[in-house]
Image (cartoon, rainbow, N blue to C red):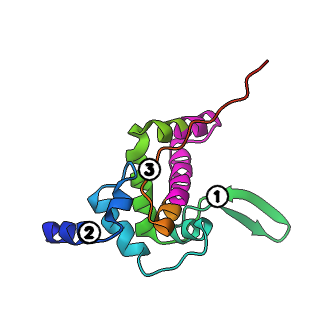
Amino acid sequence: IASQVEALVEAHPLYEVLTSMPGIGVRTCARILTEVTGKHFASAAHLASYAGIAPVTRRSGTSIRGEHPSRRGNKKLKRALFLSAFAALHHPPSRAYYDRKRAEGKRHNQAIIALARRRSDVLFAMLRDGTLYADPAPRNLPSAA
């Protein structure tokens, strides 16, 4: 059965697009395709919200308790994005983003969810345009002159 699933996934037109992103293999690609195909997302934020990786603000009356991870969303897609973000820690730009979040004081899981959210934004653009993953251009920091 696994070989049949792999053959079906590899025949999908978005297979090369998804697997071009570091941390996404055949099984993760299959999960993302099954959860996202046939649905229309107006923006990357809608995809992140559907997956349950967009932060939510807890409110009750006049009490606002800040940003927390969502308990809603598609659990299977959330897990696939979380695991792909974890696997992408070997990729230098992803690792740099993770390390920056850790330096900001976020715990491991918070930093991984932040990385998954960032990767879901890139994933949305890749699926929308049908383009392969490209490493982000290095930022030019202003020099102190």
Q: Assess whether mark 2 and mark 3 are in contact (beta carbons under 8 angstroms).
A: no
Q: Quadrant of the N terminus?
A: bottom left
Q: Earlier in the sequence, mark 3 or mark 2?
A: 2
Q: Position of residue 133 (x, y in %)?
A: 44, 52
Q: Under tag 2, what secondary structure?
A: helix
For badge 2, the amino acid type reads: Val
Judged from the image, the secondary structure of the residue bearing numbered disc 1 is strand
Q: Which residue is mark 3?
A: 85
Q: Is residue 69 magenta?
A: no
Q: Residue at x 54, y 69 (%)?
A: 47
Inter-mark Cα distance, 3 to 2:
20 Å
For the record, the magenta segment spans: 97-122
Name the residue nearer the viewer: 119 or 100. 119
**Distance between the Cα atoms at labels 1 and 2?**
34 Å
* Amino acid type, mark 1: His
**Label of residue 14 in the image:** none
Q: Pick whichever of labels 3 and 1 is earlier in the sequence.
A: 1
Q: Quadrant of residue 13?
A: bottom left
* Quadrant containing the C terminus in the rendered view: top right
Q: Nearer the viewer, mark 3 or mark 1?
A: 3
Residue 14 position, x and y percent, is 36, 67
Q: Is residue 121 magenta?
A: yes
Residue at 39% from the left image edge and 53% from the top image edge? 83
Q: Which residue is mark 2?
A: 9
Looking at the rendered image, the disc whose residue lies closer to the viewer, 1 or 2, is: 2
Which SS type dominates the magenta stretch? Answer: helix
Q: Which mark is on residue 68?
A: 1
Q: Nearer the viewer, residue 87 or 132?
A: 132
